Structures are given as structure tokens and as C-alpha cells.
Amino acid sequence: MSMATIHISEADAVRDFAGLMAHVRLGAEVVIEFETRAVAVVRPAVPSGPGRLLSEVIAAAETRGSSAVLDGSFAHDLEEVINSHREPLNPPAWD
């Protein structure tokens, strides 16, 4: 559900950033202003979805004339890359 746009000063945004973000999570767009000029817009992120299929990526690469070759060891190489970075994500406390 989209809400109306909220206009707020920089000073008010700093004083209650958590409240500002609560409005954004509910779908509001927040325009942060300095004096009478908009300096930033905060809006909900657009979900990126699951990504593209590998077949779509290959078709796009071929369309651009790419000479990349996915050989028989591609899956093994990709799995090796993924396994080399298995450490857990430790976001900062403020995230």
C-alpha cells in the first residue's frame, strides 16, 4: 500500500531517522529538504526478484557477441567460488 509523499527537513530527519524509516517500510516516499530544496528522496526498495535464468544470461551474451564459453567444469568452478565464501554475514548492529 503506497502512502503519500512526506516532506521533512534535514534536521527533523536526523532527530527521528528511525521514525522516518518506519514510514518508508510502510510504503511512504520521504523527501528530505534543506531550506526549500529537496536534497534526498528515500523510498522503499523495489524487490529485485529471483534474478535471471542462466539461459537468459547466455542469450544476452550471445546477442552482444560474447565469445565466453561455459565449459563442462563451469558448475564445479562456480561451486568452488561459493564454498570459498561460506562465512556467515555479520551485519553491523545498526543494520
Image (cartoon, rainbow, N blue to C red):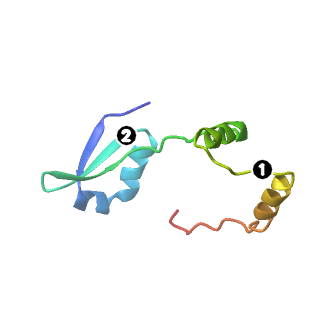
Is residue 50 visible in the rendered image? The answer is no
What amino acid is found at the position of numbered circle 2 in the picture?
A: Ala
Return the x and y of residue 88 as percentages of the image width and height. 72, 66
Q: Observer-nearest residue: 11 or 60?
A: 60
Element type at marker 1? loop
| Residue at image coords 76%, 61% | 82
Which sits earlier in the primary sequence, circle 1 or circle 2? 2
Q: Quadrant of residue 17?
A: bottom left
| Residue at image coords 83%, 53% | 75
Q: Is residue 79 left or right of residue 41?
A: right
- Closer to the camera: disc 1 or disc 2? 1
- Determine which residue is flagged by label 1: 70
What amino acid is found at the position of numbered circle 1 in the picture?
A: Leu
Element type at marker 2? loop
Return the x and y of residue 3 as percentages of the image width and height. 36, 34
- Determine which residue is flagged by label 2: 28
For label 2, the crowd category at 10 Å Cα-Cα, with few meaning under 14, some 14 to 19 and many 20 or more, is many
| Real-space Cα separation, disc 1 to disc 2, in angstroms | 44 Å
Q: Observer-nearest residue: 46 or 52?
A: 52
Return the x and y of residue 14 as percentages of the image width and height. 30, 62
Residue 88 numbered mark, or none: none
Q: From what the image shows, is residue 87 above or below residue 66?
A: below
| Residue at image coords 54%, 41% | 47
Q: Observer-nearest residue: 94 or 73?
A: 73
Q: From what the image shows, is residue 29 above or below residue 11?
A: above
